[in-house]
Image: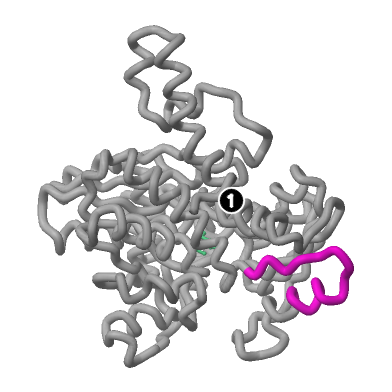
Amino acid sequence: MASSLSRTLVGIARTSTRAIHTTASASSSTLSPVAAAHMRPVNGFVGAIGNTPLIRLNRLSSETGCEILGKAEFMEPGGSVKDRAALFVVQDAEERGLIQPGGTVVEGTAGNTGIGLAHVCRSKGYKCVIYMPNTQSQEKIDLLRMLGAEVYPVPAVAFDNPENYNHQAKRHADRLDNAVWTNQFDNTANRRAHIETTGPEIWDQTDGKLDGFICATGTGGTLAGITSFLKQKSGGKVQCWLADPPGSVLHSYIQTKGKLMDREGGSITEGIGQGRVTENLKPDIEKLDNSVHVPDEESIAMVYDLLHEEGIYVGASSALNVVAAKKMAQQLGPGKTIVTILCDGAYRYQARLFSRKWLESKKLDTAIPEHLQKYIVLP
Ligand SMILES: Cc1ncc(COP(=O)(O)O)c(C=O)c1O
């Protein structure tokens, strides 16, 4: 059953469209539900979450003969796709009576969920404590602190090590009164955010005429939730694929139908790649039709390409998703409509992604084509 939250998010579009239809001129009646949603006031920070545009990537669409569409999650009020999950896990804790006014939300996060949570917590009057691997960009750590969160960067160790950032977050919440560990990896309120909001938005924005959806996973909430919704709504017709960076085990898992979980190398992408099947991914992993592995060389080149060709400034996980959408288009053939996620902006990573020294240290400077080298503006 849809929660009151999803009624707010999904309902905004419909209510707003109705209001505009009855009061405004004929031209505004042609507004899409998403555009119409942006015409009306929303209730605080949380009311602004969701209803993001779906952007046609013009160059890639004409190159492939497909409609390649990117869900502009970098336009969320907290700047990433994780705003949706942040809102749902906090609302879930409230609904289950796990947190009272003035309480503390504790989370282990590579950054974006923490940023979403820090915003949601400020807007709702909760304290926010974040544990993160110390491999994450300084921009994200600084932003969390600017948003009032208490941040603990800790050594990046595997999930089965008790010092993993997630386990440390849980122990921190256990030590406090009126505190909740929102547990984004295994709390399925995260997946529900996408079943109840992102999936329906994509369906409405394409009038149900889409053939494929593809994206990478961190917690798996985005891929699982959208897959769950689109498979159910289309009677299984929409192809749903995983996009996977180096260092993640899920491509191997899907290609071998669950027999292997091979991990090779590491990736410059942040927030994606996974060493296990999370509780968020578990209910939907068998529904996935295929998977695509994307090397960092292709992701970084696409960061620059999207900027140069489409004027879109996004991080490496979004670029990886777009590379994967292009591969899906090439495999499905011309005439198809394919949707992916533009997870966040490049602002959070610019000191790395646009620095020659950093690119050289990762041996990725040569992956950027000659005509795009001019965008490497930082030393
Ligand atoms: C930049 C970025 N892209 C993609 C994702 C993956 O989203 P999900 O956790 O829903 O799988 C994350 C998650 O933190 C992220 O930070």
Q: Residue furthest top?
A: 25
Q: Residue furthest left?
A: 334
**Residue 11 to residue 27: above or below:** below
Under mark 1, the amino acid is Asp
Q: Position of residue 16 (x, y in %)?
A: 48, 25
**Residue 302 to residue 244: above or below:** above
Q: Which residue is mark 1?
A: 83
Q: Which residues are magenta?
A: 169-183
The quarter of the displayed image where residue 129 is located: bottom right
Along the line of sight, the residue nearer the viewer: 130 or 4: 4
The quarter of the displayed image where residue 300 is located: bottom left
At mark 1, the secondary structure is helix
Q: Residue at x 36, y 66 (%)?
A: 366
Q: Is residue 176 magenta?
A: yes
Label 1 CB-ligand 1 distance < 8 A: no
Q: Position of residue 240 (x, y in %)?
A: 28, 63
Work out whether residue 307 can be spotted. no
Q: Position of residue 273 (x, y in %)?
A: 47, 73
Instruction: Judge left or right: residue 84 versus residue 127.
Output: left
**Residue 151 to residue 263: above or below:** above
Q: Position of residue 187 (x, y in %)?
A: 59, 69
Q: Residue at x 50, y 27 (%)?
A: 38
Label 1 neighbour load within 10 Å: few <14, some 14-19, many 20+: many
Q: Is residue 326 magenta?
A: no
**Residue 189 to residue 170: above or below:** above
Along the line of sight, the residue nearer the viewer: 322 or 89: 89
Instruction: Judge left or right: residue 108 versus residue 241.
Output: right
Q: Residue at x 87, y 76 (%)?
A: 175
In the rendered view of the protein, which quadrant contains the C terminus? Answer: bottom right
